[in-house]
Image (tube, grey):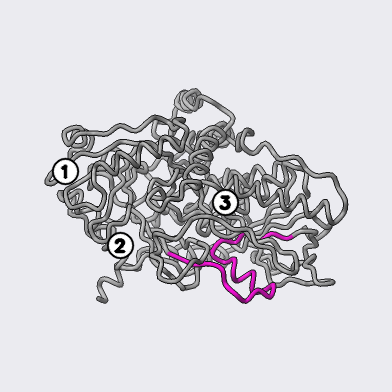
């Protein structure tokens, strides 16, 4: 990146930054992408893992956002079928709840209408008996009925990674763990950015004709480096907790209104777990320090127990937590965090730095297209180049998504001797790129073994993540590439010796680096489960 000038430097490799880099690279714009952490290590890897139209946005009358999100949901189901898949939701209505049955019917009808009746399936209203048939462990007392509607679920971290990989395949230069130190203005414009490689400690200067700030909750920090002292963001925290699905006994995803404050929240299946979320509270801490507090966890568990009273969930049932900071555009004071618009804004500073702020995961591709349209116009003004036509980001599959039948790949994995659960896991993570993992497993029988007994991930995936997915830390591997951190009780601590040795062999780690990687991963565990210490202290 420092050797030759680029047309575009994108700062921030979350879903927005990787989407911008992909779109720009597909248009033939010479693009560089950097992030101070890993791809999707911020908000984009700590989301509700939903690609959805935003049913609750109807109450706020944000109809345009729902329409746009519904369109983008269709697009992502088409271009990334392995990473974005349909998910049915049951929305039960009880006596005394904030939303009456008639209002749910009106909302779901409008939801389908704004999707131009092209959702996965249309909604259906359900009687009390049909709701309980679908979810027999749901509280029956006061149940009036409900509805079933459809949205989509996603692997947020791997969706972000897929966009980074696609950008690279189209010629973009991409690097994680590269922090922006300073802007170096010339003639009032930013054309040079000073960065440091956090792995080696070396510093470099990247020369770019256009610079884009897509750093999510860190956007105001980068804007301040450019002399923009006035913040534009309102940061709110969203927390999720994962518990064994057997403790709740839910069959489908559920949309609920919390009896504590009336907020819409979700209980969503994820493998053998169900995750409960999300909170929506103002948070002015460093986004790097966001974590689930005791109050957050108790709120989510109490809300779930109100609908599944037999579960009697306690903090001891929590397998994992995650907390993300939403970078929403600030509005008038006094607005409840849940009511703040998820619309986005594109800002341009006096020095020419473009900042994308706000927005939501579902609409990242459309936002990226809008930003790159502006970048292309600026490049035309700078050097007179022809306007770049829009990139086919809505039709070209993301890596691994070039198939209409994932079942064919699943059968191939099973024929190779793997269980259906491992096959499903591999196909869901890699799609048509599953063969690359299978080839590694075939080359060494040890790599065909599970990383953790009872979990479907296999050791070959660790090697694949290092060689082909730019995983360079232990946390990259176990949290974002494989999600073992979230899905395994105990976070695979007994298996860390093998994992760190394998990673060390691939990446050339010495004993000191291995020790620091272990310490860093154990610190991540401690932070995620610190709520238990908070409860004991309280």
Residue in the picture at 67% in, 52% down = 371
Question: What residue lies at 52% left-to-right and 59% top-to-bottom?
Answer: 42
Q: Which residues are magenta?
A: 211-236
Residue 106 vs 381, above or below: the answer is above
Query: What percent of the width, then of the height, locates residue 223?
Result: 64, 70
Q: Position of residue 348 (x, y in %)?
A: 69, 63
Q: Is residue 196 left or right of residue 515?
A: right
Q: Secondary structure at mark 1?
A: strand
How many angstroms separate mark 1 from mark 3 (CA)? Answer: 39 Å
| Residue 6 location (% of width, % of height) | 80, 55
Which badge, 1 or 3, is on the more N-terminal residue? 3
Badge 1 or badge 2: first in the primary sequence? 1
What secondary structure is found at the residue carrying circle 3? Answer: helix
382 or 244: nearer the eye?
A: 382
Tag nearer the camera, 1 or 3: 1
- What residue sits right under mark 3 in the picture? 15
Residue 490 shows up from this direction: no
Q: Which residue is mark 2?
A: 297
At horizontal 63% and vertical 49% (from top left) the residue drawn is 368
Residue 143 is tagged as 1
Q: Is residue 74 left or right of residue 28?
A: left
Q: Are marks 1 and 2 in contact (CB under 8 Å)?
A: no
Q: CA distance from mark 1 to mark 2?
A: 26 Å
């Amino acid at each position: 990146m420092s050797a030759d000038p680029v047309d575009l430097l994108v700062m921030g490799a979350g879903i927005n930054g990787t989407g911008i880099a992909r779109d720009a690279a597909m248009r033939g714009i010479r693009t560089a992408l950097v992030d101070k952490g890993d791809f999707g290590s911020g908000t984009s890897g700590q989301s509700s893992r939903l690609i959805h139209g935003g049913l609750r946005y109807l109450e706020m009358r944000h109809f345009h956002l729902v329409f746009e999100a519904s369109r983008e949901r269709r697009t992502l189901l088409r271009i990334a079928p392995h990473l974005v898949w349909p998910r049915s939701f049951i929305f039960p209505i009880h006596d005394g709840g904030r939303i009456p049955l008639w209002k749910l019917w009106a909302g779901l009808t409008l939801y389908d209408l704004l999707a131009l009746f092209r959702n996965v399936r249309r909604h259906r209203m359900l009687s009390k008996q049909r709701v309980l048939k679908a979810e027999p462990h749901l509280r029956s007392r006061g149940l009036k009925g409900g509805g079933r509607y459809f949205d989509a679920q996603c692997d947020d971290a791997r969706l972000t990674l897929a966009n980074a990989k696609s950008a690279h395949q189209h010629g973009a230069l991409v690097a994680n763990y590269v922090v922006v130190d300073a802007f170096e203005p010339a003639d009032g414009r930013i054309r040079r950015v000073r960065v440091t490689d956090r792995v080696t400690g070396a510093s470099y200067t990247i020369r770019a004709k256009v610079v884009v700030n897509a750093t999510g909750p860190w956007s105001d920090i980068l804007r301040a480096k450019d002399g923009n002292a006035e913040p534009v963001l309102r940061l709110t925290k969203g927390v999720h907790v994962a518990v064994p699905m057997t403790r709740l006994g839910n069959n489908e995803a559920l949309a609920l209104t919390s009896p504590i404050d009336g907020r819409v929240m979700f209980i969503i299946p994820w493998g053998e777990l169900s995750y409960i979320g999300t909170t929506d509270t103002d948070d002015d801490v460093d986004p790097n320090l966001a974590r689930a507090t005791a109050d957050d966890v108790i709120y989510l568990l109490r809300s779930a127990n109100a609908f599944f009273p037999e579960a009697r969930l306690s903090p001891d049932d929590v397998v994992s937590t995650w907390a993300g900071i939403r970078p929403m555009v600030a509005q008038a004071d006094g607005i409840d965090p849940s009511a703040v618009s998820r619309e986005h804004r594109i800002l341009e500073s006096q020095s020419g730095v473009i900042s994308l702020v706000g927005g939501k995961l579902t609409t990242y591709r459309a936002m990226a297209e809008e930003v790159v349209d502006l970048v292309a116009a600026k490049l035309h003004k700078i050097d007179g180049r022809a306007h770049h036509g829009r990139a086919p980001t809505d039709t070209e599959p993301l890596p691994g998504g070039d198939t209409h039948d994932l079942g064919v790949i699943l059968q191939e994995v099973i024929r190779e001797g793997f269980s259906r659960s491992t096959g499903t896991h591999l196909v869901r993570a890699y799609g048509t790129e599953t063969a690359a993992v299978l080839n590694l497993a075939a080359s060494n029988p040890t790599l065909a073994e599970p990383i953790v007994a009872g979990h479907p991930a296999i050791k070959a995936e660790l090697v694949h993540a290092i060689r082909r997915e730019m995983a360079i830390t232990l946390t990259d591997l176990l949290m974002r590439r494989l999600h073992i951190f979230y899905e395994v009780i105990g976070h695979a601590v007994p298996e860390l010796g093998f994992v760190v040795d394998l990673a060390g062999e691939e990446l050339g780690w010495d004993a000191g680096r291995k020790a620091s990687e272990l310490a860093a991963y154990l610190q991540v565990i401690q932070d995620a489960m610190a709520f238990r210490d908070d409860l004991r202290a309280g």
